Amino acid sequence: MADQPVHSRADDLACIDVVEIMTDYLEGALPADEARRLERHLGTCPGCTEYLEQLRAVAGSLRGVTDASFPPEMRDGLIADFRRLRSS
Amino acid sequence: MARPIVHAEEEGLIAALCRGDADAFATLVDRHSPAMIRVARAYVPTRAAAEEVVQETWIAVMRGIDRFEGRSSLKTWIFRILSNVAMRSGARERRSVPFSALAEAEDTGEPSVDPDRFLSADHELFPGHWAIMPTPWPMPEEGLLAGEIREVIAAAIGELPSAQRTVIALRDVEGWSSEEVCEALEISAGNQRILLHRARSRVRNAIESYHGAVEEIDFDAVTADLMGDTAKKETDSD
């Protein structure tokens, strides 16, 4: 593999198409033969390999990055409503 | 996967709700409200309007829990109510369409990466390959979200079309599975992946722009390597 050029002409996938199927690949939704073809491409293409790593980093790093907390006064009001409703 | 456990826990929760257990109701509100706000935002234009949709949904849940028949999970039932409330609310804002139609209307078929970053399809040696390829990002020990990049990412998510923003928020910010997202939003697995891919790609692009992490490929050198033409390389460097 060390002797491989940056891009191999034997590789019949184009990077412009590869970037569009990377989420399918990460999600395990690519058919096995297409996944193997993609992996062969990654073996010769540092650009696509980096792109995949970056998509993976994005997917795995966003927990809690934006806030969607429910206002406490609304929450407490709802619980009070629940108590009233269920006790009546 | 963990579905039977969730269902067993749900049964207990439902029984507690029907008994009028306010702690059980509080647990449910705390567990689902953030994701409900994210979904509601797809239908209504402001955070405040989304909070009102969530509030109205919880009122419908507390009034209707006795009629819940368990034909779906409790979570799915709650999110169906939310969609209906949000659509009614969206109708007042002239945005009353199901999530799937919203996603379709927003789909411009845009590529994940600027096509100018690639060589043309009729390039002699490398059709469609990177011309300007991504390079590694500086990765602090604290991870991708350290420092001001967090703001860059939050802004990129905030600027996404509603359907893409909702899917990435549920999947990657809230940590839902693809099955949970498809069920709550009533979209196919394929559509969910398209929305997720577009959303993650845009966030990736924003991070890349922030770092300026790209490199133009020297195709003369690559071609020389490919042809094994070392003599050419020496001549070029002279």
Image (cartoon, coloured by chain):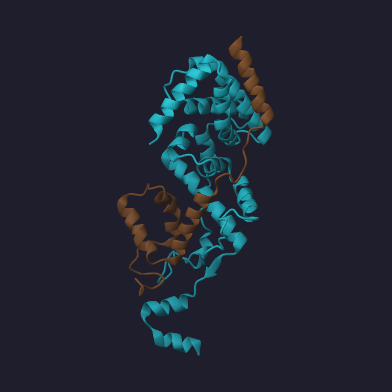
Chain colours: A brown, B cyan
The location of residue A5, given as percent across then percent down, is 38, 73
The residue most toward the top is A88
* Quadrant of the snapshot with the N terminus of chain A: bottom left
Q: Residue at x 42, y 51 (%)?
A: A26
- Up the image or down, B144 lies above or below B160; here it is below
Res. A1 visible in picture: yes
The location of residue B208, given as percent across then percent down, is 57, 60
Horizontal arrangement in the rendering, residue B76 relative to residue B162 (left or right): left
The location of residue A4, given as percent across then percent down, is 36, 72
Q: Residue at x 60, y 60 (%)?
A: B209
Res. B93 visible in picture: no
- Up the image or down, B20 lies above or below B217; here it is above
- Up the image or down, A41 lies above or below B41; here it is below
Examine the image and state in which quarter residue B51 appears: top right
Using the image as rendered, state which of residue A69 and residue A15 is in the foreground: A69
* Quadrant of the snapshot with the C terminus of chain A: top right
Horizontal arrangement in the rendering, residue B125 relative to residue B84 (left or right): left
The residue most toward the left is A33
The location of residue B96, given as percent across then percent down, is 58, 30
Q: Residue at x 57, y 19 (%)?
A: B62
- Up the image or down, A75 lies above or below B206; here it is above
